[in-house]
């Protein structure tokens, strides 16, 4: 029997070669893919509306470092506590100059901002006799997360309404405090989002 022909190079080794496998993560590309879905995307209300407020803050990781490419989306009732959406069991009701939805990316310092109207109180989802305190519904998307996370923003100057809100009342004191935006004189309300760590914001499983 003759020897098999071989090429100029030795055959590849059959020994396994350990290496780095890809991590299961997403991003960071939110800031690139969703920068301009529409003009004035951060505004849920017309910019010069007399009752407009700003809700703003930072998005930080477990060490307190800013997340520079997160995406924040807000959805809320109008000042009368109504939604312009067919899923509102009371029926969709438009509010002039207001669309109820805001979207903000974060900058290099993790800052975000939405201009909007302060929402009114609205019936609780499972009990029309109870009222929820004014709040924003919030979705957060950021690097390293396979899916978005959700939370709420309540207002620090609505202490009486907050005290009876069924969602806030269901949370421990330390978690409840992470959902309160503090009034800032002349600027609106500040709400920092902590994705992890000692001051982690309370998030909800939907």
Image: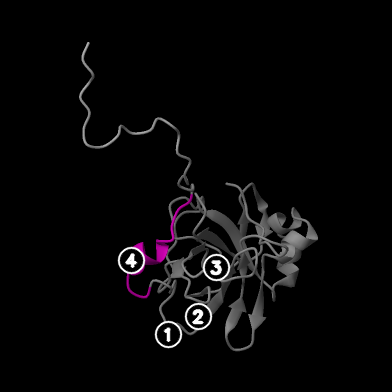
Determine the residue positioned at 40% across, 66% down. 31
Mark identifier at residue 171: none
Residue 168 part of the magenta segment: no
Please tell me whether mark 4 or mark 3 is closer to you in this view: 4
Mark 4 near mark 3, Cβ–Cβ under 8 Å?
no
Q: Which residue is mark 3?
A: 80
Mark 3 near mark 2, Cβ–Cβ under 8 Å?
no
The x, y position of residue 48, in whole percent, is 42, 85
The x, y position of residue 67, in whole percent, is 53, 68
Q: Nearer the viewer, residue 78 or 111?
A: 111
First in sequence: mark 4 vs mark 1? 4
| Local crowd size for mark 1, using a 10 Å CA cut-off: few (<14), some (14–19), many (≥20) | few
Q: Which residue is mark 1?
A: 48
| Local crowd size for mark 2, using a 10 Å CA cut-off: few (<14), some (14–19), many (≥20) | some
Q: Nearer the viewer, residue 111 or 187?
A: 111
Element type at mark 3: loop
Residue numbers of the magenta segment:
25-40
Q: Which residue is mark 4?
A: 37
User: Which corner quadrant holds the N terminus?
Assistant: top left
Mark 4 near mark 1, Cβ–Cβ under 8 Å?
no
Q: Which residue is mark 2?
A: 52
Determine the residue positioned at 49% across, 48% down. 23
Element type at mark 4: loop
- View extreme (right): residue: 173
Specify whether residue 97 is in view. Answer: yes
Q: CA distance from mark 4 to mark 1?
A: 21 Å
Specify whether residue 116 is in view. Answer: no
Q: Nearer the viewer, residue 114 or 163?
A: 114
Q: Nearer the viewer, residue 136 or 93?
A: 136
| Local crowd size for mark 4, using a 10 Å CA cut-off: few (<14), some (14–19), many (≥20) | few
């Amino acid at each position: 029997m003759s020897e098999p022909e071989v090429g100029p190079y030795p055959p590849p080794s059959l020994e396994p070669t350990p290496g780095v496998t890809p991590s299961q993560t997403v991003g960071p590309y939110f800031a690139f893919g969703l920068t301009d879905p529409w003009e004035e995307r951060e505004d849920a209300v017309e910019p010069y509306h007399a009752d407009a407020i700003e809700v703003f803050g930072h998005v930080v990781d477990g060490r307190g470092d800013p997340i520079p490419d997160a995406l924040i989306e807000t959805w809320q009732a109008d000042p009368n506590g109504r939604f312009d959406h067919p899923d509102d069991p009371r029926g969709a009701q438009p509010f002039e100059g207001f669309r109820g939805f805001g979207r903000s990316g974060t900058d290099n310092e993790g800052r975000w901002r939405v201009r909007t109207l302060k929402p009114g109180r609205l019936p609780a989802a499972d009990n029309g006799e109870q009222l929820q305190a004014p709040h924003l519904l919030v979705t957060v998307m950021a690097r390293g997360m396979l899916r978005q996370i959700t939370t709420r923003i309540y207002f620090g100057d609505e202490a009486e309404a907050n005290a009876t809100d069924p969602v806030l009342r269901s949370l421990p004191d330390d978690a409840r405090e992470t959902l309160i935006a503090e009034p800032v004189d002349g600027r609106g309300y500040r709400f920092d989002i902590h994705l992890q760590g000692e001051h982690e914001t309370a998030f909800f499983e939907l």
